[in-house]
Amino acid sequence: MKRYIPRRIEERNRWLRSDGKPNFKTTLRKHLMKLEPLMIKELPLLTPTSILLEACEFMSKHRLRVLPVTSPNNVLKGIVFGMDVIHLLAGDKRDVIRSHNITSLYEFMKLPVRKFMNDNPIVIDANTEVYNVIETMVLNNVGALPVVNKDGTFKGIISESSLVKYLARKITGVKVKEIMTKEVITSNIKRNLAQVMETMCVSGIRRVPIVDDKGRIVGVITWKTIIDLIGKHKVFSLLPRMRLEELLTMPISNLELDKPLAVTEDEDIGEVVFKMLELSEDYALVIEGEALKGIITERDILYGLLMR
């Protein structure tokens, strides 16, 4: 039987040398700076007793996909990603829902974050070289890392986004087609939310372009589309009975889909990053006519720049 490898693992592997280390180029090295200016420091803090609703509200309001969980004395206890919520609904954390016999969305939203957070995250200290931060991200297939002081207290978050914003403006001459992901996983508009979330969890992706029966793009479901259902309280008007099953079986056509930024294969990465920043987007679809040629995300950009 063929062993399934999540798409993001395959993408990571194409950027590694034979010894399993990222193949950083000298061009990139000279642009690397200290970690401190790249850190996100002003962000909401959760505690282990904070509830899922609160986490989603913070993520929606501040457009963050990762939040630290700290003790009263600011010691890092864990982290919560937006995808953790999706894995609760349709991925490898569904056992939490089953073990608590949760059938109501009210019960789901009251779930303490300690029940589903990552309580043993990979961390870095503030003195880590940016070179080593990127290497850690690549080797562990993570898009954000908490930064802690020597005593374990939380200092900030370093993310793909902050690295890309800095590096992509320094390095030009890289075309979209050189680093985009060509094999794009899509989903039909006739599917329900659970089916799309399962695709996201199994494939290790945070965005799924939605197509009609003719294969035309009608929008995109992202991790934030799902988080906003809870964080912006959309579920209260969409689901009158507030049952978990209603959320899972909701037709995709009932959702407000993300309108993607469209770019071409020959655009410069620096230009694409500028467009992404203007629209507060972390991805773009590569489209030629009505044909979907690929997708480019912050991770694709970061990995691709490692090769320059």
Image (cartoon, helix red, strand yellow):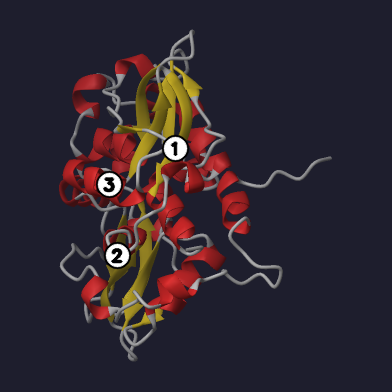
Asked if residue 139 lies left or right of residue 160, the reply is right
Q: Earlier in the sequence, mark 2 or mark 1?
A: 2
The residue drawn where x is 32% and y is 68% is: 158
Q: Mark 2 packing: few (<14 Cα in 10 Å), some, or many (20+)?
A: few
Task: Identify the residue position indicated by label 1 in the image.
Answer: 295
User: CA–CA distance between discs 3 and 2?
Assistant: 12 Å
The residue drawn where x is 28% and y is 20% is: 241
- 39 in relation to 207, above or below: below
Task: Identify the residue position indicated by label 3 in the image.
Answer: 271
- Work out whether residue 1 or residue 134 is closer to the camera in this orientation and state it: 134
Q: Identify the amino acid type marked 1.
A: Ile
Q: Earlier in the sequence, mark 3 or mark 2?
A: 2
- Work out whether residue 34 or residue 167 is closer to the camera in this orientation and state it: 167
Q: Where does residue 291 sit, x and y in percent of width and height?
A: 46, 20
Q: Identify the amino acid type marked 2.
A: Lys
Mark number, residue 170: 2
Residue 229 visible (yes or no): yes
Q: Identify the amino acid type marked 3.
A: Glu
Q: Secondary structure at mark 1?
A: strand
